Image: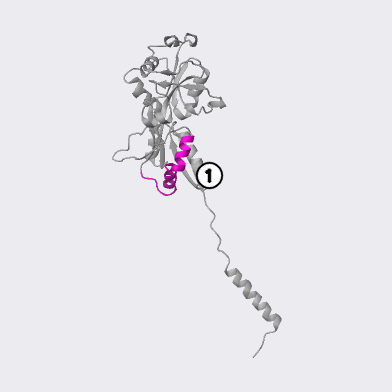
Amino acid sequence: MRRWSNPARAMTLAACALFAGCARAEPPQPTPVAEHYRLIADSATYPLMRGLTNAYAESVNPYARFTIEQGAPDRVAERLRSGQVLLGATSLVPPAPGGLKWWLADLALDGVAVIVHADNPIDGLTLNDLRDIFAGARNTWADYGQDALGNIEVAVREAGDGARVVFDRVVMGDQRLTFDALVMPSVETMLNFVTLRPGAIGYTPSASALGQRSGAAGLNVRVKVLALDGVPLTSEKLRSGDYPLARTLNLVSLYEPQGELRNFVAWALGPQGKALIESLGYATFP
C-alpha cells in the first residue's frame, strides 16, 4: 500500500480545510431595492402627509420612497379614479365613482382658521360678523372700532378648495360673496397677503396659521388667528366640536391599501403617527 509523505498529506488536509471553509460561507444577500409610491393630498393635508411620509422613511422603512402631488379635492378624486395614485388625503371627500365606495380612514382634525394681520387689535368675531364682512355689507374696520385700519380687504381661496367649501357652507350660507374679494391661489399666497396688508382678512388651514410657517419666497409669516363666536382655535376645541369651522382630514382610496402602503397607514394611525400629527399642529382623534 502506498503511503503519503507527510508534506503531501499536510497539503491535502489544508486543501480540504479550505474547501470546507468555503462551503460554509454565507450566501450573498440581495441588495435592497427602493420602492416608490405616488400619493396625492389637498392643501390642508399636504404638509401633514409630507411630514408623515418623511418620518416613516427615516424611522421605519428607509427603502420606501414617497412622491406627493398636491391638488384640490376634485383632483384627488380624479387621480385615484385613474389609478395613477393609490392613496390620497383630503379635507373634503369627493363623490365616489359610479357604483363604487371610497375606502376612508380618519387621519386628523383641523379647522379653517380666520386670519388677520398680526397687529390688528381685534381678537375675535362672530359668524354673523364674518358673513357681513365677506358679503361686503361691512367694508371698513371702523365698523368694529378700529378706524386706523381703514378698509377691510377680503381674501378667499379658489372655488373647490376645501377651506373655501367649509367657509362658504358654514359662514356664507346662501349669501353671495362680495365682488371685491381677492382670490388667493394657495395657502402661501394667502398667508403672504394677510401678513403684508394691515386691513386684510382671510382664512387658511389651521396648522399653517398656528405654525406660522414661511410663506412664498421665504417671507416670515405673521398673522393672528381669530376666535369665532368666542371659541378659540385649539386642539381641544377641535376635538370637542366647539370650534365652528372644524373638519376631519381623511385618507382615501378606491381599495383598502395593501403591502407597504398598508404598513404606512397603520403606522400613521398608530401612536407614533399620532404624536407626529399633534406636533405638526393638527388634532388627533381620541
Task: Work out which quarter of the rendered image holds the N terminus and state it.
Answer: bottom right
Q: Residue 272 lies in magenta, yes or no? A: yes
Residue 87 location, x and y as percent? 41, 41
Residue 57 location, x and y as percent? 51, 44
Is 184 located above or below residue 259 in the figure?
A: above
Task: Work out which quarter of the rendered image holds the C terminus and state it.
Answer: top left
Q: Which residues are magenta?
A: 255-279
Q: Residue 221 vs residue 81: left or right? A: right
In the picture of the structure, the residue carrying the numbered disc 1 is 58
Is 24 located above or below residue 213 in the figure?
A: below
Q: Residue 30 lies in magenta, yes or no? A: no
Magenta stretch, overall SS: helix
Is 99 located above or below residue 202 in the figure?
A: below
Residue 6 location, x and y as percent? 70, 82
Residue 110 location, x and y as percent? 41, 31
Q: Residue 64 vs residue 76: left or right? A: right
Q: Residue at x 38, y 24 (%)?
A: 167
Circle 1 SS class? helix
Q: Residue at x 71, y 80 (%)?
A: 7
